[in-house]
Image (cartoon, grey):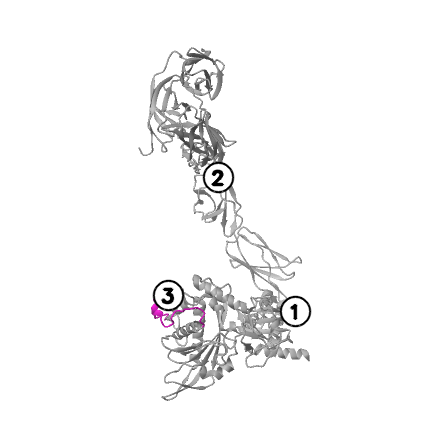
Amino acid sequence: MKELFLKRLRVVFVVISIICLVTVSFSANIGRVHADTAVKEDYYTVLKQLTEQVEKEDHTPLQEKVTWKFKWLVFTDVTFNQENATPEHRTLDSNDQRYAKVVADDFKKSLEAANPNILVDIDLEMYTTPIQVTTSNNDFILHESQIADVLAAKVPYGAYDSIFALSDSLGGGGVTKATYYSDITRGAAYSGIGLSKLYVNNYPEHSTDRTIEYSTDIALHEFCHQMQMAGLIDSYPDVHGSTTYGYTNDPKNGWMKFYTDYLTGNVKDPKTGKLIGIYPEMWRLTPRYLQEIVPIIRGGIWGFRPSGETDQSIDVLEKVYIPVDYKNMYGSSWFDFYFKVGSEEIGANNIKSSNTNVVQFLNFDNAIARMKVVGTGEATLTFPTKNGSYTYTKQVVIYDEKTAQVAVNSLFEAADVNQSIKLATDQQAIDNAQKLVNSLPDNIAVNLQTAIDKAQKELDTRVSMPVLPTVTEDTKTIVIKGVPGARITVHLPDGLEISKTVSANGEATFTIDNQVIGTVIKAIQSLNGKVSLEASTTVKQGAIAAPTMESVTTENTLVKGTGLAGATVTIQAGTITYTGVITTNGTYAIAIPIQAKDTTITASQTKNGVTSSTVSIKVIDNRTPTAPIVNTIKDSDTIITGTGTQGDTIQVTTSDGIKYKSVVAADGKWSVTAPSQLAGTTISVIATAPNGKVSPKNDVIVLETPQEGKLTTNDFTISKDKNIVGTFTGDVVTFRVTIGSNVYKGGTLDKGKGTYTFYALDKAIQPGMFKIEALDKYGKVLDTKTANIVKTSTEIQVGAGTVTANGFVIHQDKSLTGSYTGDVTAVKLVYDGVTYSGGTVANGNYTFYALDKIIDKTKTAYMYGYDAKGNKIATSTISLSDAKDHNTNTVGIGTVQANDFTLYVDGNITGIFTGDVKSIKVRVNDTTYVGGSLVSGQFIFYARDKISSTSQVVVVDGYDSNGNKIATSTVTVKNKGY
């Protein structure tokens, strides 16, 4: 009895329409934001965020769209009793009602398309009961007081944000502010608008020459008024002042642009230049936000709310069946589950559908869970309680009766279930139909299931098709599988028929001639008077050999070879595939990009669906490499980098001729480690391919790295101090001291301690001030300090005098000789930077044993003179030569001529030389420097770190092959800009 009751109850729910009729009550407390319960603090938080948005003109969309609920009541029969005119009876027919739906949909689409912050939920209802209202002359807009009874009956208190009442009128509208304690507007904003046929050209459908309908334009206008009346900010755009803000009426859009800009806060105030209107946070403050929805229901029973029916409990139903083409009274596919009790315990955010391809969960509000039909199938709906202690579940089956009926009928001849099944009907077709029938309610499925059972029985007793093997153009024998004892008949393309009986092992063997590719061989088998469906196979291409392929070098852009005429050849170079068709003469040429050495290239050919094996080659390197790319080089770099072709050898040659090598890696990069080079010098880079070919040279100039440094200094005391002393940091390499008009350069640095000394005993001899400058390796000033030159109370007198050194011949002289004057009492030899004490000083002459000290004429040597107190008071340069030089007695002849040197502009001393000049030295004051390059009558000598003042005496000396100085030229030092 219970089973019969459930089956009948299921039938009832199949045929009813499912809609949402909600009854709830409201209080006047703080309410909801989005679908979540809010507290009072939320309201003030939203107001604060809104204020900040308007001030900052911040239009950042809400993280979650807000649903605005609209109630649209369309009055189809209204008698307007005018004050001083004849009553006017206005009605809306079925086309008018259809057009009202078009306008409502137009309103929803316009708002949602323009505004990323809201979802528009319109509850559209046709009110067909005739009403009479009292109104002023020619006012056919319905005002809320005129339909108060209708609103009380149709609009639950606090259920909507906005109410629109539509009546037959040429246009116009009115608006009422949302009154949260009003019994008339039910806590919502209200507008009455006319459903107008003005400017309509496709009635009752949407006009084809307008973006929005004229009545939609009116509705947007009135909705702007509703939002303005909320009074959330100090100023809103004037809804009637669109032209003030630069807007014009568009024949196809009306004032839509102004209204959508208004509702998105994008109307520009011509006075302030700011964007004004409705900002994102305003949408959260819906009229329903100020209502607290308090369900009057408790417990845990739920049910459908079908149209025109009382509540129907579905707890007793195992499954709820809904047709896939279901539509509610609004023409939509959503349906509702209504919780008669217990809704306040449901966790709305956790409601789920197990199969969203069948049923989707839309929202949960006012004890109503709204769902949407998506497709056929079965889904489990779960409704967990907030505390997770229990989960309500319900099985929903969305069925497709029409598709199931078609699937079943198609199994039979002439789509008639009373006839036999078609020859084409197979097990897959029956299974597909059975799947559709399984989803139907029992009362609908019963007849269809009977037809499926009939089809299955017929299929089970039918002779199966024979199984044909693959047949190629070369096949001579085919073995066909069938039912033992059955008779198989083969139909060849030329019309010949061959029949044989299937052996006990289930095979029948047929001998045939070669067949043409693409032709079809057919076969059937018969047994006990029943004939199977026809089986067939298409004659295919037989196995084909791989194509040939010519060699490919790193310079080739064509892959060439031979193959079967008309076949498609496939070339794979690396990871890229290229294809082409082999010509009628059996050759091919496929264009490819230039490939790297050792890249594997494969080729295969395909004809009539058959692909050959592959042939492969490796790319031969035959290229001349391009000049490698060199990254910027600075004078501080010890690693030189760049890019090139993988596998190429990179050779880097520094200015001193030393070579460094590297190989380009797989990523195309290379690097070499080399000592840092001076700025202005040239580094040359070449690439050599594995085939031995060399690229052009890439010359790169070394750039200067910005230098930094600081110094400190102390006062210098005459007759007490020998050196100016202090500390330094950073890139300081030497110092320059200015005393009066005299400029001196030098100093000794202790980089470990960060201290320096600058010999000044013979320079700072009068009280006053001195300036000391810290210089970098290029002679640029990094820091400057000044200090005092002072006397002590007991001044110590410094001696005065000179020393003159005679030349010294290596491998001939044993001692250095020379003369002195004045207060010189001792001498010291400085050779190649090393100081030696000794010698005999008497009667204006001196000797100094140097046989074991001076051994190389290319080094520098000086003789220093000292007074009785050890002060260095004199210096003389010693000329060196070697008795073992070839042609010692022959001195070369030649000249050197130096160009001017400009401070801070030039890095090198340059000039020309002639004759026997083989090397040069540069003297800056008392310091001699060896080096430079001499090529083709020109010389270059890096001097930026040596010359720092126009007061310095700079001389270039030229030497012959025996080291004899045979030429001299003075360098004119200029300031920058002169």
The image position of residue 194, as x and y in percent, is 40, 79
Label drawn at residue 378: none
Of marks 3 and 2, which one's residue comes earlier in the chain?
3
Q: Above or below — where is 355 with respect to 650?
A: below
Q: Pointer 2: what residue? A: 669
Q: Above or below — where is 369 with respect to 917?
A: below
| Element on which disc 2 rests | strand
Of marks 1 and 3, which one's residue comes earlier in the chain?
3
Point out the frontmost of discs 1 and 3: 3
Of marks 2 and 1, which one's residue comes earlier in the chain?
1
The one nearer the camera, 33 or 556, is 33
Assign the C terminus to one quadrant of the image. Answer: top left
Q: Which residues are magenta?
A: 230-254
Q: Pointer 3: what residue? A: 269
Q: Above or below — where is 444 with respect to 855?
A: below
The amino acid type of the residue labelled 1 equals Tyr
The one nearer the camera, 128 or 25, is 25
